[in-house]
Image: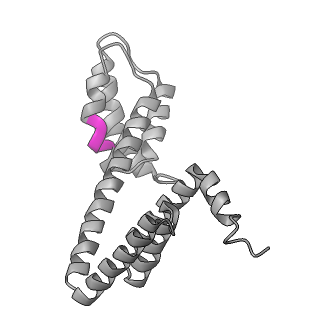
Amino acid sequence: MTNNPSEEYLKKIQADFVDKLNNYMNVRVKMEPIQIKAWTCALANHRYEDIKAIWKDFMLEVQPGYLPPIKSVMDMILRNDVRQREIFSNKKRVIEERQLETRPEEFSRFIKELQISLTKLKAGEYNMGNHYNHMADTMDGLDIKDGAREHRSLAKKWIAENPETIEKEAYSDDVCPI
């Protein structure tokens, strides 16, 4: 998203998207100047590539004489942005995994820590939150930042969803020093 789009960018957005939309709509209804301005400003808050990526799908929703709300375009741009971030994240994860595979000693360490954590999980020494945090620490040590961040997020989510397990472990007789 851009904060203050330039006059040139506004004109480009209006010419490439809003005017074409207005011409398509012109069968029965023509957009008012205030609507043209609102659509131009709303779209100009997003990158040109993001708008272009969803525009064909949006135009399928448009019927002559019916102008969908601006929000429907914004929602489509947001969904596309989330989808693009997921694709980028997955590609980045694959690259990190390949890099780990090219460093056998670190891969070996990763597998060893995974086995330790899973053994503690099976033995009841760890819950899933502990397991995720253990693996996040391991990934930090191996410079796999995205994987570590993801595992810390999973740990927080698990802990939030299972507070009774955390309380029970924190106050059990064998843990409490009193």
Residue 106: % across, % down: 29, 86
Residue drawn where x is 48% and y is 40% of the image: 41
Residue drawn where x is 53% and y is 55% of the image: 157
Residue 172 position (above or below residue 5): below
Q: Which residues are magenta?
A: 51-55
Compared across the picture, whether 81 is left or right of 159 comes to left
Residue 127 position (above or below residue 74): below
Magenta span: predominant SS is helix
Residue 51 position (above or below residue 4): above
Q: From this viewpoint, is residue 45 visible?
A: yes
The quarter of the rendered structure image containing the C terminus is: bottom right
Residue 116: % across, % down: 39, 77
- Depth check: 70 or 169 in front? 169
The image quadrant that residue 121 belongs to is bottom left
Residue 3: % across, % down: 52, 54
The image quadrant that residue 65 belongs to is top left
